[in-house]
Image (cartoon, rainbow, N blue to C red):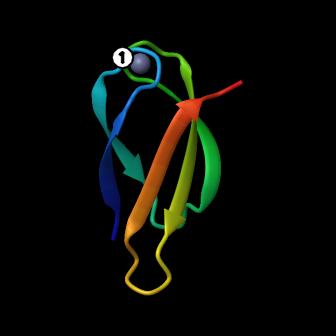
Amino acid sequence: MSDTVEVRCPYCYEALELWVDPETRGGFVQDCDVCCRPWQVYVERDPEDGTLHVSVQRAQ
Ligand SMILES: [Zn+2]
C-alpha cells in the first residue's frame, strides 16, 4: 500500500502530488519538482485508520 497526497509548494505554490512510502514516518526533506527548492515534509499516520497527514514547510 502506498499513498499520494496533494501538497502545495510553500515557495512557488504549485499543487503537486507527493508520493509517501508506506514505511515513512516523521520528517524528511524533498526538493520541489517545479522550482527545486527544499521542502521540509512531515508525515503522520493515524494509528486507528491509517489516514495520512502531511504538512510541507520551507526547509531552513
Ligand atoms: Zn516549488
| Amino acid under disc 1 | Val
Q: Quadrant of residue 28?
A: top right
Residue at the extreme bottom: 48
53 left or right of 6?
Answer: right
- The image shows residue 50, relative to residue 4, as above or below, that is below
Q: Which residue is under mark 1?
A: 34
53 left or right of 57?
Answer: left
Mark 1 secondary-structure assignment:
loop
**Rendered location of residue 42, percent (x, y):** 57, 50
Residue at 53% of width from left, 56% of height from top?
A: 43
- The image shows residue 29, relative to residue 43, as above or below, that is above
Q: Quadrant of the N terminus?
A: bottom left
The quarter of the rendering in which ligand 1 is drawn is: top left
Residue at 46% of width from left, 76% of height from top?
A: 46
Label 1: how many residues lie within 10 Å, few (<14), some (14-19) or many (20+)? Answer: few
**Rendered location of residue 49, percent (x, y):** 37, 83
Label 1 C-beta lies within 8 Å of the nearest ligand 1 atom:
yes
